[in-house]
Image (cartoon, rainbow, N blue to C red):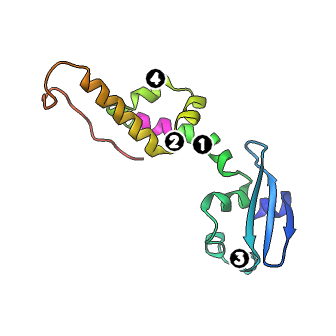
């Protein structure tokens, strides 16, 4: 929790502490509420994920590194999407690789499952536009691979 202790404003209440500080990626304000019992468990040497199981991984990451959930998404999500699309280029990933900028990826998709759904839909649309039967052996639909 180096970042939280060094760079965040702390408001200590009876049963909880509120950490508020800037996201190092975006500069926007982010707030995390930690129970004082969790904070004490962390100070006694428990790993943060064991001391603060109530917090999601993204908020624990903010306390440690200063990258908020939205900062993490804006910084790393487009590259994750491109990696997934490249792995599944023949299964519809080509639509992402060829046509989307990083900004458009952030606008269009919230999760990697959204990307998968979009690519499968584009493949289905392309299949429906061609002549012939759906069970044509020349139509090879690769299985989607997750990263």
When the figure is inspected, residue 130 is found, relative to residue 64, above or below; the finding is above
When the figure is inspected, residue 35 is found, relative to residue 139, above or below; the finding is below
- Mark found first going from the N terminus, 3 or 4: 3
Structural distance between the alpha carbons of marks 4 and 2 = 15 Å
When the figure is inspected, residue 30 is found, relative to residue 1, above or below; the finding is above
Task: Please name whichever residue, 61 or 117, is drawn nearer the observer in this view of the structure.
Answer: 117
Residue at 71% across / 57% down in the picture?
Answer: 62
Residue at 86% across / 65% down in the picture?
Answer: 10
Structural distance between the alpha carbons of marks 1 and 2 = 6 Å
Task: Please name whichever residue, 82 or 92, is drawn nearer the observer in this view of the structure.
Answer: 92
Q: Name the residue under label 4.
A: 98
77 horizontally vs 69: left or right: left
Q: Mark 1 points at which residue?
A: 76
114 horizontally vs 71: left or right: left
- Mark found first going from the N terminus, 4 or 2: 2
Q: Quadrant of residue 54?
A: bottom right
Q: Give the range drawn in magenta.
A: 80-86
Quick one: label 3, few (<14), some, or many (20+) residues within 10 Å? many
The verdict on residue 45 being magenta is no
- Mark found first going from the N terminus, 2 or 3: 3
Q: Name the residue under label 2.
A: 80
- Mark found first going from the N terminus, 3 or 1: 3
- Mark found first going from the N terminus, 1 or 4: 1
Numbered mark located on residue 38 in the image: 3
Q: Determine the main secondary structure of the stretch shown in magenta.
A: helix
Element assignment for label 2? helix
Structural distance between the alpha carbons of marks 3 and 4 = 47 Å
Structural distance between the alpha carbons of marks 2 and 3 = 32 Å
Q: In which quarter of the image is residue 106?
A: top right
When the figure is inspected, residue 147 is found, relative to residue 6, above or below; the finding is above
**What is the x, y in percent for residue 82?**
49, 35
Residue at 15% across / 26% down in the picture?
Answer: 138
């Amino acid at each position: 929790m180096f970042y939280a202790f060094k760079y965040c404003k702390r408001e200590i209440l009876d049963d909880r502490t509120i950490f508020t500080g800037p996201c190092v990626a975006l500069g926007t304000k982010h707030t995390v509420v930690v129970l004082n019992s969790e904070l004490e468990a962390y100070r006694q040497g428990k790993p943060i994920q064991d001391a603060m199981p109530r917090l999601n991984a993204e908020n624990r990451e903010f306390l440690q590194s200063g990258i908020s959930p939205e900062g993490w998404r804006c910084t790393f999500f487009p590259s994750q999407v491109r990696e997934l699309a490249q792995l599944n280029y023949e299964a519809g990933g080509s639509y992402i690789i060829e046509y989307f900028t990083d900004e458009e990826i952030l606008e269009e998709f919230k999760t990697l499952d959204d990307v998968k759904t979009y690519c499968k839909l584009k493949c289905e649309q392309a299949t429906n536009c061609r002549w012939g039967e759906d069970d044509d052996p020349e139509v090879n639909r690769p299985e989607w691979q997750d990263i």
